Image (cartoon, rainbow, N blue to C red):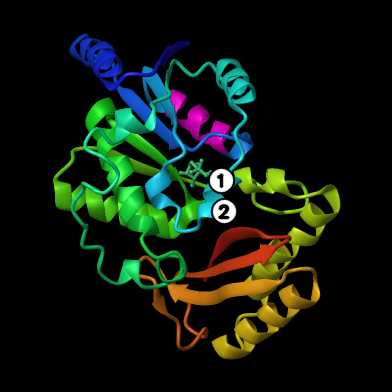
Amino acid sequence: MIIFKESVSISKYLRAKQISGCKIGFVPTMGALHKGHISLIDKAKEKNDITVCSIFINPTQFNNADDFNKYPVTISNDLLQLAQAKCDVIFLPSVAEMYPNGLNSTPAYNLGNLEFILEGAHRPGHFQGVCQVVQRLLKIVQPNTLFLGQKDYQQTLVIKNMIASAGINVEVVISPTTRLPSGLAMSSRNLRLTEQQLEQASAIYKMLEYLKDNHTQQPEESIKFATDFLLKNGFETVDYVSILNIPQLTPVTSTKNSSEKMIAIAATIAGVRLIDNMIIY
Ligand code: AMP
């Protein structure tokens, strides 16, 4: 496992590997790694000769300073997990390395409606920051394949949109969400919850499962039922429970047809904001 901190050095190393015929798979992360991240590494390894993982807590994608300051940092444990997963190359850039022209210097991306719904609505500027950092990382790593998690479904659409607009030549693979035995989606932010709060937080998954099997009723009824359930079961706020058509993420008006849809939930427990989703038919 080779660790790079400078973009010039990692680029030079990876370009030489590509010239010798190696295919590169890339998994960008913000660290505090868990089995969900490692599932992406495993998938990248299956399909590529070299797997690169970046760890960078991107300041421009946090709309809330408290969330940024409290974001878990577990770098030695991260490196241990990456070594066990046999990840080939790790990129640990500094803020200066990722934003050589300063934090406010990148032009705005046109993300259409994605910027104004769900995470876009509740975290203003978040997806602009995601696009800035992912575009820069793609320029440095130049992977053949980029691996992203379905847990951040809206983010996968935003990144695909940015890749298409910027004309970047990379395949995007979306990988399923890894869950705890309780069904709670694995998340770096889970580290901020106690055992009891983690158990309570699995109410999100219980609601996704419930709505999956009981979505013949009107969407508003399902949404109200799920919101009330979360608020009665330990969550202090529910930003949204939404049932949407995919991939375009327009609101579903009738759940009776059998097209692919998604239930998306964002809610806060013990000051920790969690998101999750499930595809239904
Ligand atoms: P993050 O470090 O949270 O920015 O996530 C890095 C990548 O891992 C993103 O593509 C996420 O969607 C993905 N990811 C996060 N949690 C999970 C999970 N529980 N299962 C699978 N992928 C995940």
Q: Please, is residue 7 above or below residue 265 in the view?
A: above
What span is in magenta?
37-46
Mark 2: secondary structure: helix
Residue 66, numbered label = 2
Q: Residue furthest left?
A: 167
Foreground residue among 134 and 71: 71
Q: Amino acid at mark 2?
A: Asp
Residue beneath disc 1: 69
- From the top left corner, tell me how far across and down residue 94 is, in percent: 39, 28
Q: Amino acid at mark 1?
A: Asn
Q: How many marks?
A: 2
Percent x, y for residue 72?
61, 39
Residue at point 52% right, 83% down? 255
Q: Is residue 202 left or right of residue 159?
A: right
Does any atom of ligand 1 lie closer than 8 Å to the CB of label 2? Answer: no
Q: Nearer the viewer, residue 263 or 227?
A: 227
* Residue 218 visible in the shown view: no
Name the one closer to the observer, 165 or 132.
132
Examine the residues drawn in magenta and state their main secondary structure.
helix
- Residue 141 image point, x, y percent: 28, 26
Q: Is residue 275 above or below residue 238?
A: above
Instruction: Find residue 4 and report its image quarter.
Output: top left
Q: CA distance from mark 2 to mark 1?
A: 5 Å
Classify 83 as above or below 47: above
**Which residue appears farthest toward the right when viewing the image?**
196
For this view, does 279 lie left or right of residue 6?
right
Residue 64 seen from this side? yes
The answer to whether 239 is drawn above or below residue 59 in the figure is below
Residue 141 belongs to magenta span: no
Q: Are marks 2 and 1 in contact (CB under 8 Å)?
A: yes
